[in-house]
Amino acid sequence: MKRFEKDKPRYILDSIAELALKRHKMAFISGPRQCGKTTVANILKDGYDESKYFNWDQSEFKKRWTKNPDQITQDFNLNKEKFSRLMILDEIHKSKNWKQKIKGIFDLNSKLINIIVTGSARLNVYRRGSDSLMGRYLLFRLHPFSLRELIEIDPATPEECYKNLFIKKHSLADSKSKIVNTTLIDLFNYSGFPEPLMSRKKNILNIWKRGRKEKIVKEDLRDLTQVKDINLIDVLTNILPEKIGSPLSVQSLREDLEVSHDTVSRWLAFLEELYFFFKIKPYSKSIARTLKKESKIYLFDWTDILSEGAKFENLIACHLQKACNFWEDTGEGDFTLYYLRNKDKKEVDFLITKDKHPWFSVECKYKNTSLDLNYKTFQGSLNCPHIQVVYEEGIFRKIDDKTWIISADYFLLQFV
């Protein structure tokens, strides 16, 4: 893997330009704090004759926006014909009635100014103001780096991914095995976030983690919610890494924190909306005796997870969720990540559905390369392939027509 460049191109750039900006729609880019949203926006501005960057945390801009948001369009030269312009609004979701105000600017200037809105919260969740932006924007969810992106391969289409998963051909996992394996180790140890991954230093990782968590808990929560128990939410963020890989019990968290069930649920919702973690639900359609309520959660930064097995599962979950979000955001179909678990506690780590139908299931095994047979409990009902992903390199073993054991390096290279 090459050393990071300051403005390393990201997997989502072409899709934003082609699907949103060239069609005169606003591009909303959301994702975890410090995953590269502003970098993406700044790379995109290079293709414009004129660009302006506005950040809600800048006091002068905040004053202008609050008084008269239309005023910021006066910073552009709107008299020139055949002149391309880009406005970048960063963290604007912290403003009251921000969608209503952007709607007014867009409706007046959509042919003159392209608009990118970035934010470290789920921009489709914070619906402030009564006016809808339906049809005016496309949402793109930016994730941290994944293995395929770091090796600098364009994102796979769902068809390419599915085909290559089950037919072992010459691949980069073979031709550049040393680079791929080193990159996977770096991801495992330093996360997919640019700053710690670029440094490959434990002390830099620790400093970055502390700063990121403080910004999420003490700044973003303060700006977007009325919550007051910041210290207890900080404790909650320290507990969550221990819960990875198992259905999350809100009752257990309630007892640990000594607060009500509703309070814990509300705090978890805030942290999810701020991209501290994402959750996946159990798949229940057509499966007898399955769980239907308890979700599992996974962290966007898995480096706080002490168990190597849970950490490996989290890394795989992030790659699968990234692919599902990207394919959905770019119009490839409806892709959703689930897990499988029945009342007899038989479980399979992941199931991806395509257009609401089972596509393939995945079991993660950090060290054990022998086949886990729990998948057979569900395979008859799902009627889809099953893959056991192992950390050990160099494994591609077909068990039968619907079952494979595959190394993580080859498996992850097939996605986004």
Image (tube, rainbow, N blue to C red):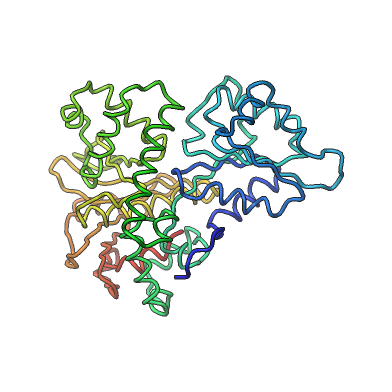
Q: How many numbered marks are there?
A: 0
Q: In the displayed structure, would residue 147 be above or below residue 96?
A: below
Which percent across, then down, holds residue 142? 49, 48
Residue drawn at 57 percent across, 51 percent down: 40
Q: In the displayed structure, would residue 40 be above or below residue 170?
A: above
Residue drawn at 37 percent across, 76 percent down: 177
Residue drawn at 42 percent across, 62 percent down: 162
Which percent across, then down, holds residue 123? 51, 34
Q: Quick one: 39 or 289, which is closer to the camera?
A: 39
Q: Quick one: 139 or 231, which is closer to the camera?
A: 231
Side of 383 where 24 appears, left or right: right
Which percent across, then down, holds residue 223? 46, 27
> Which picture quadrant has residue 46?
bottom right
Side of 310 where 40 appears, left or right: right
Residue drawn at 29 percent across, 51 percent down: 350
Q: Quick one: 258 or 318, which is closer to the camera?
A: 258
Which percent across, then down, holds residue 305? 24, 50
Q: In the displayed structure, would residue 280 be above or below residue 160?
A: above
